[in-house]
Image (cartoon, rainbow, N blue to C red):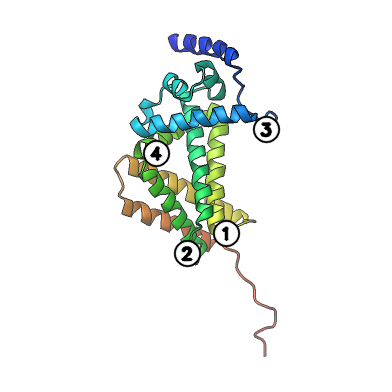
Amino acid sequence: MPAEANRDKAAKAAKAEGGAPRATPASPLTERQEARRRRILHASAQLAGRGGFDAVQMREVAESSQVALGTLYRYFPSKIHLLVATMQDQLEHLHATLRKKPPTGESAAERTAETLMRAFRALQREPHLADAMVRALTFADRSVSPEVDQVSRQTTAIVLDAAGLTDPTPDQLAAVRVIEHTWHSTLITWLSGRASIAQVKVDIETACRLMDLTAPKETGTPGRNLR
């Protein structure tokens, strides 16, 4: 197939630029490779922001990030891998921003809902980018599992930080998973025009109440009320 032939040719070209294989826990990126990866993710976000999913073409990403096409494929084997990694990168930046200005709600549910709505509004400002990343998550198959898992871990970290949980119980982790599913679902329905921002807010706030419902019950001091 032409696409496979182009990919094989691109992979061979990567050697000329010293392209690195995809990073694993056993082989962390060097400073130069990390800088190259950041350029690729930046180019991906820019192209997606301008024209959505279809605007992200691997050859254009390579040109915009000033890397060989083969090198790009060695970092990200497909457009889906690239866009899911782009979402993880965007969430990482969002997490850093939220840490600088944490939510102010009194309860864990209020803080979590406030955080997710801030995340939602950030994506709302870049609808084409949001659509491209969500579509990539939807299309992702098992080969993209590591990247999808990173997105899930980043979302979990954001929710746990918002709720102020450092040692969550199994029930609280289950609540976090439901909240994550709700957040992604509302994002999809909003992007498809099937939900308003007001509806999104109600759904997120409703799901986030699970954080309070699953909080460990405080136990009183034995005999305190005995007379």
- The residue lying at 46 percent from left, 34 percent from top is 137
| Mark 4 Cα-neighbour bin, 10 Å: few <14, some 14–19, many ≥20 | many
Reading the image, the residue beneath label 3 is 25
Q: CA distance from mark 3 to mark 4?
A: 28 Å
Q: CA distance from mark 1 to mark 2?
A: 11 Å
x and y percentages locating residue 154 in the rendered image: 55, 44
**Residue type at the position of mark 2:** Gly
Q: Earlier in the sequence, mark 1 or mark 4?
A: 4
Quadrant where the image shows the N terminus: top left
Reading the image, the residue beneath label 2 is 105
The disc label shown at residue 164, or none: 1
**Residue type at the position of mark 4:** Ala
Q: CA distance from mark 3 to mark 2?
A: 37 Å
Reading the image, the residue beneath label 4 is 130
Q: Secondary structure at mark 4?
A: helix
Q: CA distance from mark 3 to mark 1?
A: 28 Å
- The residue closer to the viewer here, 175 or 95, is 95
- The residue closer to the viewer here, 161 or 224, is 161
